[in-house]
Amino acid sequence: MIGLPIRLYLDEHIWRGLTQRLREKGYDALHVCDVDRGGLSDEAQLEFAAQEGRAILTYNIPDFSPLARLWYEAGRNHAGIILSNEIGHGELLRRVLKLLETVSAEEMKNSVRYLQEFK
């Protein structure tokens, strides 16, 4: 990977232990619970992630897919949206690490990626 690494913001339904595992590998990961933002709207979560320069990782595909389109149409910038089906902890960690090793923060900016791409 060339460029700066992606800084992650994990949505509330994502396994909280993933944050620690990623930090142990040297990545900058923040969970919704770390900043007491549980229960807020998807829009509010994406706004926070964008302000912090973090790509958001979420299982909430039905809500974040249209939200990404709305932001695109409005010309709003974000650090990226990473969508995934719910998968086991080990597979989630493996796929996220593969994404982080191959996609830079610049490449992730204003894009939507599916963890399925990183099997």
Image (cartoon, helix red, strand yellow):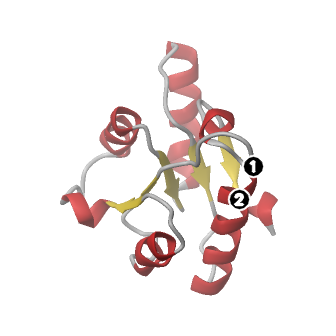
Quadrant in the rendering for residue 29: bottom left
Q: List x then y, in percent, for residue 60.
A: 51, 57
What residue appears at the point 64 percent right and 39 percent down from the top-left corner?
108
Residue at which label 2 appears: 101
Above or below, 43 against 93 in this view is above
- Figure check: 41 above or below 32: above
Q: Relative to 112, say whether 77 is above or below.
A: above
Q: Residues within 10 Å of mark 2 (few under 14, many from 20)?
A: few
Q: Secondary structure at mark 1?
A: loop
Q: Are marks 2 and 1 in contact (CB under 8 Å)?
A: yes
Amino acid identity at mark 2: Glu
Q: Nearer the viewer, residue 98 or 66?
A: 98
Residue at 52% x, 56% y: name it: 57
According to the image, label 1 marks what residue?
1
Residue in view at x 51 percent, y 36 percent? 79
Q: Position of residue 25 (x, y in %)?
A: 54, 72
Q: Which residue is more in the foreground, 113 or 59?
A: 113
Quarter of the image with the C terminus is bottom right
